[in-house]
Image (cartoon, rainbow, N blue to C red):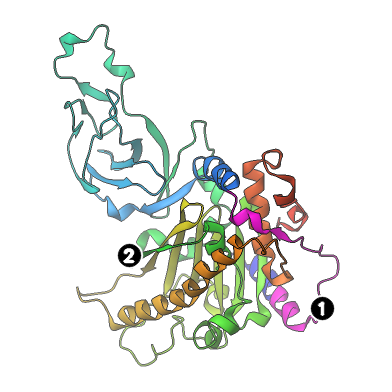
Amino acid sequence: MKTKKINEVRKQIEYEYKRNSYPDGFPKIPDISGKRYTDQEFFDLEFKNIFLKSWLMIFREDEIPNPGDFKIFDKLQRDILIVRQKDKSVKAFYNTCSHRGAPVVREKQGSTKLLKCQYHSWAYDLDGSLLRVPDERDFLELDLSCRGLKQVHCDTWDGWIFISLQDKDPGSLKEFLEPVASEMDCFKSSELKTIWKNSTLVKANWKTCLDAFMEVYHSPTIHKDTVNILLDGNGMAAGLLKNGHSRMVTPKRINLDGGMLGAEGQDFVPFIETCDSIHAETNVAYAMFPNFITPTDTSGYVAILFWPKSLRETEIEYLQLGPKWEGKEKPQYWIDQETSFYSIMEEDFKNLEPMQKSHDSGVFEKMPLNYQERRIYYYHQTVDDWVGRENIKSEMIAEDILSPFIEK
């Protein structure tokens, strides 16, 4: 984060500590319709217009390090084949043979020199081009050059692989990720390693789940013996960023240079020296549209991804990135940190399914949001930008009222 922005954030934190009322000049945040969490038609519109079009972070580059390495991404009701190319670049395709639609790989992950259909042995190069067809003489005017695998937009950023499933050009990935990408440069993510990885299936709408990670208003209640010991929500400074992204900077009550209670005195405490001062002094959490949340620290960051499985079911995937260490054995710090983080996630999970039941009860008609929760409204506003307000039932629309407050 640039020095000018760091100073702006610090001033905002000072203001948050001093204010004792709703800020002058900030608009009243409208209630959000409860139907946004229960309406099947609205969910279908979100899935079609956001998850099948937006850039999506899917997994780390180091999961397919060598030419011929491949992995299947299957979070969106279709199998997408990600392949490391001979020139070390990455390409993505539908795992669908152009003959009769059979998969060209059956394994979820592996390595190969040739992509071969599992039904009739049509053979494709790693770049998706069709090389040969058994009994080609039995086809009339078969042009192999027109029968390659259907390609998916694919790009990388700082060690992460992204795809977009829309047919049209989705635009520049780096431009889409700004300004979050630049602010996270200090972590040098491509040099970090995956420490642990997990996923949980939650019986709640994906926005019910994601909303829970967009504010610290709940910390004194839900995380009173965990997060609330470390972070002071009274000074939380929220930033609305372009492209639907946002930032939440929460001052630390205790600065542990690693962010975990109990790490004091351990032989190994990870520390990323390139982190700037604001990331060292506070907890900076980013939301990257449409489904990525990360609380960061000088020890690294946890990437949390929200994948809608159905109207009332979400897969929450989360993994910890941190600096490499000497030796093969995982340091005790990371073993303790994993246990600590899982317990914090469980505190959040306890509310989500009961909340969905409340949404479905018919009495939860509207959701009032306070100033601390403005990131949630901005997120819903961006959802409607992608879906198109002309496609949404009038009583469910999140009007665009926060665009004037997006940071320049």
Classify residue 86 as left or right of residue 76: left
The residue located at (75%, 56%) in the rendering is: 402
User: Quick check: can you spot residue 229?
Assistant: yes
Image coordinates of residue 308 in percent, x first then y, are 47, 53
Determine whether 229 is above or below 408 in the image. Answer: below
Residue 46 magenta-highlighted: no
Considering every residue shown, the one lying at the far left of the view is 135
Image coordinates of residue 13 in percent, x first then y, are 69, 77
Residue placed under numbered mark 1 in the picture: 21
Label for residue 157? none
- What's the residue type where badge 2 is placed? Lys
Classify residue 408 as left or right of residue 25: left
Circle 1/circle 2 CB separation < 8 Å: no
Classify residue 333 as left or right of residue 272: left
- State the quadrant of the C terminus: bottom right
Residue placed under numbered mark 2 in the picture: 193
Q: Along the polypeptide, which appears first: circle 1 or circle 2?
A: 1
Q: Depth check: give the residue in front, 63 or 9.
A: 63
Determine whether 132 is above or below 138 in the image. Answer: below
The residue located at (50%, 88%) in the rendering is: 225
Q: Residues within 10 Å of mark 2 (few under 14, many from 20)?
A: some
Q: Depth check: give the residue in front, 110 or 50.
A: 50
Q: Secondary structure at mark 2?
A: strand
Image coordinates of residue 263 in percent, x first then y, are 38, 88
Image quadrant in which you'd find residue 192: bottom left
In the image, which residues are magenta?
11-39
Considering every residue shown, the one lying at the far top of the view is 140
- What's the residue type where badge 1 is placed? Ser
Q: Secondary structure at mark 1?
A: loop
